[in-house]
Amino acid sequence: MSLPKHLSTTLNGIRRIGSTFIPAPPLPKHWERGVGGEGIAAKIFLRQWLCIMVIFVASSVFPASARQSNTIPLAFVYDPDTDELLAIYGDKVGHVKSYQLGAADVFPSSEGLKLLSDALTFDETGSRVAYCLKDYSRDRTVGHPARLIVRDLASATNIVELDLGDVTSCHVPKKSFNAVSNTVFISLTIAPYGDPVGISPTWRLIRVDVAAGTIVNEVNNMTPELVDSDFADVPTTADIQYMEYSGATLVFNLYPYGAGGGFEAEAYIWQIAINTITQASDWGQPVMDVLPASGERVYLDIDPSLPGGDVPVGDIPYFNAVRIVDESSVPPRTIYHRPEGAFFDVTFVNEGQQIAVKFVSDQIDVPPHWILIDRTGETTDINKGYSDSDIRNAPGGYVNFWVGLVVGTPTMIWDFHLVYTTDEGSVTLWDSEPSENSINWELAWVQPVIGIPDLTYFPNYRR
């Protein structure tokens, strides 16, 4: 079977790191041009200040296009305190299944050990979940014993339990499973201050065979193509930015261990079948999303020529521009700017027909909210008045996960909601029980979307 059109184009413009040039991977041709900067890799989460909840009015008619599957979940939400994972389906209201991930059983002697939703990675069908935990009950000079878990949700069994040795940090990147779920990747930081002897890796990006539960191959700071990297001899975290559908090619980013959200990473393309690594120009921005159908990349950046571009960059950068790279853009183009605030997240929605960007205003009376940008350049403000919200691309529209503060109670009581929006309306698929714990539920996963190819390009921003 041939690759989809958008993945069959040769990437010609990247630089070979070794001594021999190898033909580039089957990625969209405009990826060779770079973007000035992402990475879905390290998506920034900003807990916003409290805003009193407004009444949310959803369509009482369930969107016909939302009835797309009663076997594959539309989304997962996770409660770190109870280790409960809820699968929420998009075929009808109330179709929810509950699972336990068994996190407390991985290292029973590590009291209080818990997962967060950022640590969970799911396969394409939502049937398997992978995560990594460390055993803090055992004293170590550097790092703690770590273990990779791959769990089959239906049978409630761990199909992989792989010990990884002593590590400083471990995580399973969000885009770690290939399409058939027989391979998963895990990132390890081994030594937080580098290896003084220089005879063993200080970071590793490992490919694991799920069926065998063994390591197949890896890249690390001693990989020949990476020995000249700026990250060869410093504490480093590797994260996956994008994986081609078959899992044969992926883009990974390298970040300094413990770096804040504003750091621009080095990026590389790993062609797994022939085991070569090439440098990818400007994939290192910390907030990026990719639309597989078109190969477009949208990301947040700092434009010094626009208002807010001269604000000092700290752990949470002051992004003032939304940029895109596509087949029309050399160099990448700024498609949106708001002078009175900053952006903190961005994602394609509605199968790629729109972009959603999270905006925080400098004006105290304007609550944080999301802005929808369509391909004519028109914008719509949504989610004003929510205490916090998260929007992600979903089949036929987008998922809106939001938390509200319950009005009229003597203490702070929170409730959580998952809303599915398509062009036929919005429906609330799930509501939580009110809770005094403000981080009770977290959005862990939304069903992946390839998107619509050959859409009109987003227009340039005009002052």
Image (cartoon, rainbow, N blue to C red):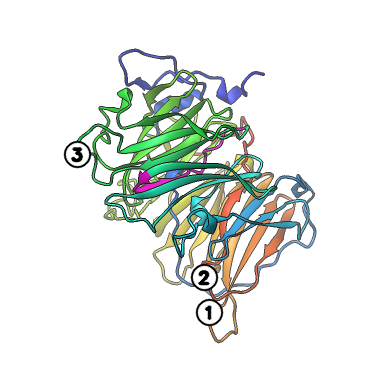
Q: Out of 91 and 125, give the one closest to the viewer.
A: 125
> Of marks 2 and 3, which one's residue comes earlier in the chain?
3
- Return the x and y of residue 255 as percentages of the image width and height: 33, 42
Q: Distance between the residues labelled 1 and 3?
A: 50 Å
Tell me the SS state at disc 1. loop
Q: In this view, does 300 lie to the left or right of 227?
A: right
Q: Is residue 275 left or right of residue 376?
A: left
In the rendered image, is residue 63 in sight?
A: yes
Q: Give the range drawn in magenta.
A: 166-179
Q: Residue at x 53, y 62 (%)?
A: 80
Q: Are marks 2 and 1 in contact (CB under 8 Å)?
A: yes
Tell us which disc is closer to us: 1 or 3. Answer: 3
Tell us which disc is closer to us: 2 or 3. Answer: 3
Q: Out of 316 and 332, give the one closest to the viewer.
A: 316
Three-letter code, disc 3: Pro
Disc 1 target residue: 412
- Return the x and y of residue 230 as percentages of the image width and height: 25, 34
Q: How far apart are marks 2 and 3 (CA)?
A: 43 Å
Q: Do the residues labelled 1 and 3 touch (CB within 8 Å)?
A: no
> Of marks 2 and 1, which one's residue comes earlier in the chain?
1
Magenta region, mostly helix, strand or loop?
loop
Identify the disc placed on residue 438.
2
- Return the x and y of residue 16 as percentages of the image width and height: 35, 19
Disc 3 target residue: 196
Q: In which quarter of the image is residue 462?
A: top left
* Vertical arrangement, residue 261 with respect to residue 20, above or below: below
Neighbor class of circle 3 (other Cα within 10 Å; few <14, some 14-19, many 20+) is: few
Three-letter code, disc 2: Ser
> Of marks 1 and 3, which one's residue comes earlier in the chain?
3
Tell me the SS state at disc 3. loop
